[in-house]
Amino acid sequence: MAYKDLDRLSPGSVDTTLKSIDKIDIDVNESLNILDVGCGVGTSTILLANHFKNAEVEAIDLFMHYLDVLDEKISKNNLQSRVFSYRMDMNDLDFANEDFDIVFAEASAEIIGFKRALNEWKRLLKPEGYLIISDLSWIQKPSSKSVKFWKNIYDEVDSIENKIKQIKNEGYEFIDYVTVPKEDWNSYYNKLEKNLNKISSDKSARDFVGQIKKEIKHYRENSNDYSYVFYIMRKC
Ligand SMILES: C[S@@+](CC[C@H](N)C(=O)[O-])C[C@H]1O[C@@H](n2cnc3c(N)ncnc32)[C@H](O)[C@@H]1O
């Protein structure tokens, strides 16, 4: 209900995703294999398929109710011949080694952690394949309030500089990064907040809604401290 009718499950926009995928040096007409990990309702899955016109895009998520929404989009866009959704756990990705030219993960790597994602998803990439992951990052020296807030939710939030070091330590060539702008966060949180205000207040919903509202309030008061940042890298 909280996420009902939202076109994405994280702060972002078509413009920001496009800016990130434009960093990679691949002809958009090539026939590519692309994986979208933790695709949610698949707005970026469809964007990837429309951008890379001859690509086959496989999209995985743990939850069928999101994949059902993506499946509707696949049909609406007539992409059944080259976009495929699977219910799959990112802890155990059932794909062969070196299957993909691009592995894309928007606001989902945090489920297993950025470092583990860098390490485990490398095997899925063809030589010189690209990994594009967005991850929560400090975009300035954060206040102690922000550090305390995120420590208990996602303990891998770190500076962009340290994230780039981790990328290099895992043996990737770092290409560039793109920071998700404030307008993407504001637009996402405004829509989410409207849904939250419609949810009835039984005890379990109250705790859940309260937690998300706290997150929104915290962002509005500390938006200079952190953002999702897309990291673009290549397997060496
Ligand atoms: C913050 S949402 C991001 C969704 C989408 N990439 C977007 O940006 O709109 C994280 C997604 O990861 C999915 N997810 C959570 N745990 C997962 C798991 N273990 N394996 C695969 N997907 C998972 C959720 O269902 C959700 O769709």
Image: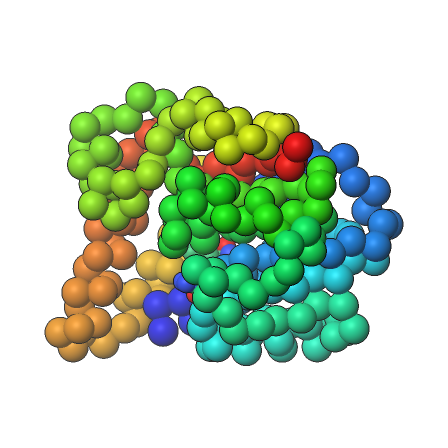
Between 180 and 157, which is closer to the camera in this rendering? Answer: 157
Count of number-bearing discs = 0
Q: Is residue 11 left or right of residue 20?
A: left
The way the protein has been coloured in the rendering is rainbow
Question: From the image, which quarter does the C terminus lie in?
Answer: top right
Name the residue: 27% across, 56% down. Answer: 212
Q: Is residue 83 above or below residue 131?
A: below
Question: Is residue 185 visible in this depiction of the protein?
Answer: no
Q: Is residue 105 above or below residue 198?
A: above
Question: Is residue 155 visible in this depiction of the protein?
Answer: yes
Q: Is residue 5 above or below residue 164?
A: below
Name the residue: 39% across, 34% down. Answer: 137
Image position, residue 96 (x, y; %): 64, 60
Name the residue: 41% across, 25% down. Answer: 162
Image position, residue 83 (x, y; %): 71, 68
Between 47 and 119, which is closer to the camera in this rendering? Answer: 119
Q: Is residue 11 left or right of residue 125?
A: left
- Residue 194 location, quadrant: bottom left
Q: Is residue 17 above or below residue 168?
A: below
Between 89 and 70, which is closer to the camera in this rendering? Answer: 89
Name the residue: 74% across, 75% down. Answer: 80
Image position, residue 18 (x, y; %): 66, 43
Ligand 1 location (quadrant): bottom left
Q: Is residue 145 left or right of residue 69?
A: left
Question: From the image, which quarter does the N terminus lie in?
Answer: bottom left
Image position, residue 193 (x, y; %): 33, 59
- Residue 33 location, quadrant: bottom right
Q: Residue furthest left?
A: 203
